[in-house]
Image (tube, helix red, strand yellow):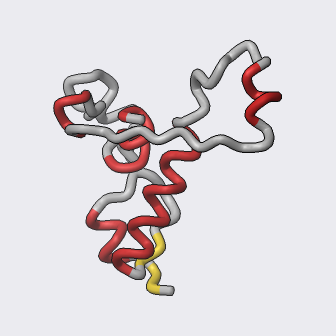
Amino acid sequence: MVWGVGQALTEETLVDPRSGRYVNADLAEYHVPVNADIGTIDVNFVESAGRARESRSALKGAGRSELPEWGGDRERVYNATGVRVRRLPITLDKMLSGSRA
């Protein structure tokens, strides 16, 4: 869940347009959130009809939360502000120049 929030709100690879090289090529410049950045997380599991089929998979749920998480964050930002941000991460500059729907 922390990785999903990081993907949605902070993680961005920046490229220098003149040289084509990464500006933040190491972890000193690339912000990856940790548990201390997020705070307390309340997790609720929802039973579904497909749950029996999913429980037989080899992954057992590992790696399933990252991609859906940013979509939820994007919708929460849209519902709160009326601004649709279409590229990750969701930053203030993108919200200010974003499209109001």
User: In the figure, is residue 24 to the left or right of 59?
Assistant: left
In depth, the one of 30 and 23 nearer the eye is 30
Position in image of residue 77 (x %, y %): 39, 67
Position in image of residue 50 (x %, y %): 79, 38
| Residue at position x 52%, y 64% in the image | 86
| Residue at position x 30%, y 76% in the image | 96
The number of callouts visible is 0
Farthest residue toward the top? 58
| Residue at position x 79%, y 29% in the image | 52
Q: Is residue 15 visible?
A: no
The quadrant in which residue 14 appears is: top left
Where 47 falls versus 86 (above or below)?
Answer: above
Say which quadrant the N terminus sits in. top left
Position in image of residue 5 (x %, y %): 38, 43
| Residue at position x 46%, y 67% in the image | 85
Farthest residue toward the bottom? 101
Position in image of residue 82 (x %, y %): 41, 81
User: In the figure, is residue 92 to the left or right of 45?
Assistant: left
Farthest residue toward the right? 53
In depth, the one of 30 and 59 nearer the eye is 59
In depth, the one of 5 and 40 nearer the eye is 40
User: In the figure, is residue 50 to the left or right of 74?
Assistant: right
Q: Is residue 81 visible?
A: yes
